[in-house]
Image (spheres, rainbow, N blue to C red):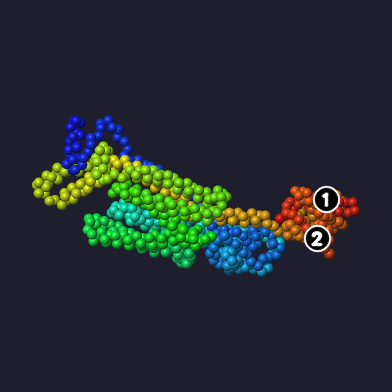
Amino acid sequence: MPSTTRAPFRAAVLRAVGRSVAPRPATAPRSATPRSTATRVLFALVTGAVALLGVLAAAGPAGAHAALTGSDPAKGSVVRGAPEQVMLDFSEGVAMSDGAIRVLDPRGQRVDTRKVRDTGTAGKVQRAVSLKPGLGKGTYTVAWQAVSADSHPVSGAFTFSVGKPSKTSATVPQQDKDAGGGTVGALYGVGRYAAYAGFVLLIGGAAFVLMCSPRAASSRAVQRLTVTGWTTLAASTLALLLLRGPYTGSGRFADVLDLGALKDVVATKPGAALVSRLLLLAAAALFVSVLFGAYARRGGEEAAQEEAARQRRDLRYGLSVGGTVVAAGLAATWAMAEHASTGIQAGVAMPVDVLHLLAVALWLGGLAALFCLLRWGPAPTGTTVRRFSRLAFTCVTVLAATGLYQSWRQVGSWSALTGTSYGQLLMVKVLLVGVLVSVGWFSRRWTTRLTESPAEASVRRANVPARRSPESDTVRTSARSAPEARDGQKAGTTDPVRAAQLARQRAAADAARERQQREADPQRSGLRRSVLTEAAVAVVLLAVTTALTGTEPGRTEEQVRAATDTARNAPGGPVDVKVPFDTGGPDGKGTAELEIDPGSSGDNSLELRTTGPSGKPVEAPEVKIAFTLPAKDLGPLSVPLKPVEREKGHWKATGLQLPMAGKWKVAITVRTSDIDQVTKTTTATIG
């Protein structure tokens, strides 16, 4: 057919099926459809989000949540006599079973009684285990494992010495190293992310229908979005419940189906929260079925009837009240088992955390529902978009207020904000929220253009040239079948198969026409692109939020640093100094061994032994010791030594006053005969 007659013929055929099409200029280049462009953008952004999530997961679980802030005996300390027990101090509440604190002697043998006691008073979190009597000298290893009050497994190990340090063959048990890590830890992290995502889609999608667009209840895209959220949240919660035992215990994936461990998990606070979430999801399933069942049906043709409209209002009120209770209950299952439930002001932090989670769900989940309508229809009206815009602004305000409080509570100082992993992740989260708000500002610009009346919108769409799209083939197929349909009607044909085929073709033509009108609407096309960008950023934001919940709060990390610095600067026990000497005379070679106890500033006692090359005591007619602190220009301080009766080569001094901590210079003078004498110097660090 000549090209000059093809366009009028095509227009005539399409008008036969009720579609008006403006001719396309012959020289117009064929560009990519918005659908293909949006798909590529979404794929790139989601791929980047998944890559970021992979990086966060590869970083491994957090080092600690309930951090060890002190112990008795202290880490690395040297005590004079064997202690009766070992006590551990924590920054927040912990759960410890019997045997969770192990004390191993230098040979690696266990010397504790396995019974863990709660010895904390006046709000102090402290656990203790008794030691067996008669412990010898040497270095002891303490290994501990616990579950912090925010549901994360924590563990650690340190050493202390009795008398003096020694070599030790003790090793930390393998399960202490595996808890919270490995394959189980990675799967648990993925499950936590999926739970957050499911909660956002479920609550946000349902709230969007009730608060912004009741007609969206009949949208299959919004229905699939909300049901997907419910399914994801239910599946991830069940997976977390099964993984909880090995996550906080052995770390072995094979223990996932251990019913005994599952029973123990249910008895804990995090386990009870997961079980409560499953029960609330059963109620949420009923809520969703009513929302997209009875409520959606009453939004159809019967809505024009006064009685049906009244029933719809009553149903909407009941769904709003019940949905609020279910949503708050689901959010509380996180608040009661994670960071909000521990630390300072927990009674205020938990309801604030519930508000924070609900605001996130309403904003991001509603954003996903709006994108579904913009992409798959029915196209949202200007009223719908403006309602969501106001809802999003309210959510951002709530997020700013609750986030500011949570940041102060979990960080507490500028140094913790910039110098801890939690603070740095928090700054990334704030940056992402800022990006979301900025993109949302562009969305509001598109929203303000969706204000024309339906008649004006129809005129505008009619004046926009139609775009070629894959759906055009379907329209042309329906157009070609229209004459056949008329011929069939004239002939009185009542073939049900043919009638069903024609109905499907007409439905496809209607859908293609509606989609092409949406694609040709520049306002909704621009809004769809900005909403798509917001949704992609939201995926990354959820990944960072998940990482935050698995990271030690900045306030706690600074407490640990302070405790570590204090332990490092605290007295380390008796100071041992060995100085070889050679006076040059017969039997003039030997070693002077000096022990200063407790090795701290103030009052000390001193013992000195002289031994020969064979290790036997060496008798020296005279031994002198003097202390000097060059940094403070203090000294020399002479020490009068007295020989110990009936012990050859052994001297003692009491009441040695070393007024300051620091690196002291020690001068030891040994005389082995009337003329053979030598002075040797060394240093001793006094705490």
The residue positioned 41% from the left and 52% from the top of the image is 394
Which type of secondary structure does the marked residue at label 2 adopt? strand
Which type of secondary structure does the marked residue at label 1 adopt? strand
- Local crowd size for mark 1, using a 10 Å CA cut-off: few (<14), some (14–19), many (≥20): some
> Quick check: 108 left or right of 238?
right
Circle 1: residue type = Thr
> Quick check: 154 left or right of 139?
left
Mark 1 lies on residue? 679
The residue positioned 16% from the left and 43% from the top of the image is 482
Report x, y in % for residue 574.
Answer: 72, 58
Report x, y in % for residue 6.
Answer: 19, 33
Mark 2 lies on residue? 653
Q: Quadrant of the C terminus?
A: bottom right
- Local crowd size for mark 2, using a 10 Å CA cut-off: few (<14), some (14–19), many (≥20): some
> Quick check: 575 left or right of 285?
right
Q: Is residue 212 visible?
A: yes
Quadrant of res 21: top left
Report x, y in % for residue 376.
Answer: 30, 48
Q: Can you say whether 250 is above or below 479 in the image?
A: below
Circle 2: residue type = Ala
The residue positioned 20% from the left and 34% from the top of the image is 7
Front position among marks 2 and 1: 2
**Farthest residue toward the left?**
491
Report x, y in % for residue 108.
Answer: 62, 61
